[in-house]
Structure formats: C-alpha cells, structure tokens
Amino acid sequence: MTMQAVFEGRLKDMAMAVPLMCCAADMCSLPHGTQVVLVGRRSSEEFENMLAAAHSSFDPNRNVMHIDPSDHEEMKVWEENNSNIAEMAKKNFSGDKVVGLVCQNFTCSPPVTDPRSLETLLSKKPAS
C-alpha cells in the first residue's frame, strides 16, 4: 500500500503517525464530500427547519454552510475568501425563503426551499 510506504518512517518513530495515516487513507479513498449550502436569514423558523433537514441523516463527509446575504459583514468575508460561494448565495437569496443547495463534485443541485426536498436530495446516493 502506498500510504504505508509514505508513513513507514513515521510509524516507527512516532505513534501519532498512525491516526494521521488513517486520516490520509480516508481522504484518499473517498470521493469528494457533499456540501449543503443554506442561503437565508438565520433568525427564521424556515432556516431552523432547513438546518434540521440538512442534519437529518448522518454523513461524516457532509459540510453544511450557512450564508445570510443580508449580513453585510459576513458577505464581505465570503467575498474575500470564497467568491464563488458568495456569488451563489447572492443569486439564490430570497428575502422570505431559505434556499438549500446540495453540491458534490463541483456541481450543485437546483435550489430547493422545502425541508423534505432537501432531505430527498441528501438521501440520494452520491455520484462517483
């Protein structure tokens, strides 16, 4: 195994290398994770419902990002650090609804505004 060869010296010298090797093997063996982007005001019941839907099933390789385009300071941080996400949030922002997008392999689903629709998207098997 290539990972074992890479870490062989460390495995002999330092016990901490074993967990690091396991992390590296995990990252190399799995396809890209899933990102869930929730766009909307955090102080709404709709946001809480969409957030619950995003976390309704366990997936250790899922990241959930909350973006509130009405928060100018937050948007400034996103624009400086990830302009693609900032632009996606601006395009999908609806003042009265929370929009959810499921992204994998650099492709995002069409936006959904219903928690059940978000759960359905997340229950689908990821594409390889």
Image (cartoon, rainbow, N blue to C red):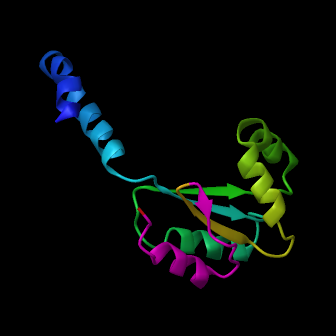
Instruction: Let me know if residue 85 is in the magenta part.
Output: no
Point out the stretch of residues depicted in magenta. 106-127
Side (left or right) of 85 relative to 57 = right
Side (left or right) of 9 relative to 113 = left
Side (left or right) of 114 relative to 25 = right
| Identity of the residue drawn at 43% across and 72% down | 57
| Quadrant assignment, res 11 | top left
- Work out whether residue 15 can be spotted: no
Of the pair 16 and 120, the residue shown nearer to us: 120
- Most extreme residue toward the left, as rendered? 12
State the image coordinates of residue 24 (x, y, percent, origin top left). Answer: 31, 37
Of the pair 43 and 31, the residue shown nearer to us: 31
- Work out whether residue 52 can be spotted: yes
| Quadrant assignment, res 115 | bottom right
Q: Measured along the vertical axis of the image, is residue 12 above or below residue 43?
A: above
Instruction: Let me know if residue 107 is in the magenta part.
Output: yes
State the image coordinates of residue 16 (x, y, percent, origin top left). Answer: 23, 26
| Identity of the residue drawn at 67% across and 64% down | 38
Q: Where, quadrant-wise, is the N terminus in this rendering?
A: top left
State the image coordinates of residue 14 (x, y, percent, origin top left). Answer: 19, 19
Of the pair 101 and 95, the residue shown nearer to us: 101
| Quadrant assignment, res 17 | top left
Side (left or right) of 61 relative to 75 = left
| Identity of the residue drawn at 34% across and 43% down | 28
Q: Where, quadrant-wise, is the C terminus in this rendering?
A: bottom left
| Identity of the residue drawn at 82% across and 62% down | 91
| Number of numbered discs overlaid on the protein picture | 0
